Amino acid sequence: MLQELSIKNFAIIEELNIAFDDGMSVLTGETGAGKSIIIDAVGLLAGGRASSEFIRKGAAKASIQGLFTLPSGSVTFTVLDDLGIDHADQQVIIDRELNKNGHNTSRVNGSLVNTTTLKRIGETMVDIHGQNEHQELMQPEKHLQLLDEYQPTKLADLKQTYTTQYTNYRRLRKLAINKREHAQEWAQRVDMLKFQVQEIDDADLSVDEEDHLISERDRLANYQKIVTALESSYEAINGGEDISALDQIGAAMTAMQDIGNLDPEYQTLSETIANAYYGLQDAANGLSSQLANQEFDEGRLDEIEARLEVIHQLKRKYGDSVASVLKYYTKIKAELDNMQGDQDNDEALMTQLTEAKASLQKAGETLSSTRQKQAKQLEKAVHEQLKALYMEKAVFSVRFLKHDDTPFFATGIDDVEFYIQTNPGEDPKPLAKTASGGELSRMMLALKTIFSENQGVTSIIFDEVDTGVSGRVAQAIAEKIMVIGQHSQVLCITHLPQVAAIADHQFFIQKQIKAGRTKTTVEKLTNAERVSELARMLAGTTVTKLTTEHASELLRMAAAEKKQTGSR
C-alpha cells in the first residue's frame, strides 16, 4: 500500500506530507481544492507522463516521494529483481523530480530509472481509475484483455503455449509467402550466384599469384635490357682484352698479403681487399650463371598478360584484391548453398507450415474453450454485482466472434465483445453502443470489484468515479468500493456523502490564499470532524442540526454495514 506521500512545489501544492493507512480512505473538499492534484502526483510515481507545467509557479523544480509497503511475494519484488534494483523490509521508495529545464529524474530505492521502467514497476502497485476510466468498456478491442484479467492464472500457461505456437507459425508462413511472392527474384538471384561462383571457380585464383606474374612479366618485358646489363657487368669485372678488374684487385690482394704481418693496419687493409676480391669473384660467377639462364619466350609473355587480365576483371567485379575476391567467393558460395538447400526443401517447408498451423489451431481452441468457460463465470459474477448496483434486470454477456479471413490473432483465435440487455424484451446489444454513462460506470465498478482479488495491485485509486449518481445507487457504489478496500488499499476522491461515510479514513482537502498565493492543505479528520464534513457535503453552504444528525446517521449506518460485511 501507499504508506506515505510527500509532495513539494507541485501545481498549487507548496508542500504536503500525508500518511495513509490500509483499507478505504476518501479525499473530500470543495471542487478545485487540489484533490485530483494529489492523485496526479501518485500517478507520476506510477510512471505517468511528466510536464514542466506541473511545477508550482516561482519554483525551479517539483518533487514527489512515495513510500510503499508490500506483502512478501509481491510481483513488484519480482520485477525489481529482474531489473537488478535492491529492496529490503518489504518497502519500495519512489522519488520523482521535475525541473523547469525539462530534465526529470526518477529513482526507485535510490536507483535511477527511466519512465518506461518506472511505469513497469508502478503498474504492479497502483491502479488509478478516473471519471472517464469506463472508456475501456467503450473500446471492444479491450474487452478480451478485461476478460483475461478474470482469474488470469488459469490462462497463463495456455496463453504462453499459444504465443509460442503463434510465433513459430508466423515465421514459417512469412518464409513461405516470401518465397512464393519473390520466386522470380529468388531464381534470378540463384542464377546470378551460380554464374559468379563458376566464374571465380574457373579462375582458380591463389593469393600470391598476381605478384609472381607481375614480376615474371616485368622480366620478360625487359629481357634485352637485363641481358645487356649482365654482360656489361661481367665484362667489367672479369672480361675484356686488357687485364680485368678482378685480376688487378687480385694483384693488390697478393701484394698486401706479403706485408700484412708487419703492421695491424696493413693486415686490416689486406683483409678488406681480400673480401672485395672474393666478393667480386662471387658476383662474376653469379653474372655468368644469370647470362647462361636468360631465355626470352614471347608466348609465355602473352600467357602472363592474358592471366593478369583475367585477374583484373575479377577484381573489377568482386573486390579490390585477389584476397577480397576470394572472400566474396566464400560468402556467395555459402549463400548459394543455403538458397539451393531452401529450394530443395520447399516441400518440407510446406509440411512444417501445415503442422504448425494444426498445432496453433489446437492451442487456440484449447485457450478459447477455457476462456468461454471463464466468460460464463464472469457473466454470473457480473450479474451478482449488478444486482447490488440496482441493475438487476440487466443481462450481461460475453460474445465470441470468429473471423474466417483472419483466424489467428496474437492473443488467440477469439474476438471478444461485451453485450448487454438493459431492459427486458429487448435484444442484447454491444455494450459500447448501448449503455449510458451511469451504466458504464457501474459496469466498470462491478468488474473492478470482481478483479480486485486477482490483480495483486496494493493501491487502487478512484477519482470521482461516482459522479452523476445519487440515492440508493450512490449507496450501492459506496458499498462496492468498500468491498474492494477489503482486498486492497483504496484511495477515493468523492463528492458523495454515502461514499465518504463508508470509508475507514477521511482526509479533508482545502485551498487557502496567503500572501496572494494559493496553497493546498490536507487534514485527516477525526470522527467528530467527519460528521461536520459530511453535513457540509449533504447541505452545501448552510449546515443545520438536521443535516448534522443525518451525517451522524450515515456514519452509524456505514459502520453497521462494514461490520455486517466483515462477518459474512
Image (cartoon, helix red, strand yellow):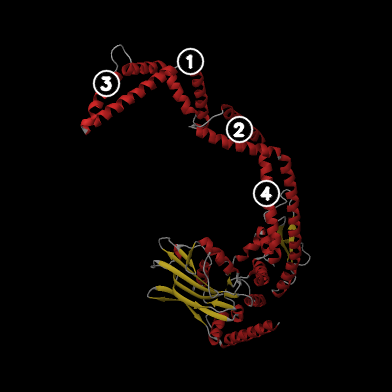
Q: Are marks 2 and 4 in contact (CB under 8 Å)?
A: no
Q: Quadrant of the N terminus?
A: bottom right
Residue depth check, mark 3 versus mark 1: number of the one nearer the observer: 3
C-alpha span from label 4 to label 3: 96 Å
Is residue 222 shown left or right of residue 552? left
Q: Amino acid at mark 4?
A: Arg
Quadrant of the drawing holding the C terminus: bottom right
Sooner in the amino-acid sequence: mark 2 or mark 4: 4
Between residues 44 and 156, which one lies in front from this camera angle?
A: 156
Is 476 on the left-hand or right-hand side of 53?
A: right
Dividing the picture into quadrants, the one containing residue 89 is bottom right
Task: Please name the amino acid that badge 3 sits on.
Answer: Ala
Q: Residues within 10 Å of mark 2 (few under 14, many from 20)?
A: some
User: What residue sits right under mark 1 in the picture?
Assistant: 298
Q: Which residue is mark 4?
A: 170
Between marks 2 and 4 in the image, the one whose residue lies nearer the viewer: 2
Q: How far apart, in angstroms, are the residues tagged by discs 2 and 1?
A: 37 Å
Answer with left or right where residue 398 lies relative to residue 32.
right
Viewer-closest of 303 and 98: 303
* Residue hosting label 3: 251
Which residue has dot 2 on it?
A: 193
Q: Along the line of sight, which residue is nearer the eye, 389 or 191?
A: 191
Residue 380 in the image: state x and y as whole percent: 75, 69
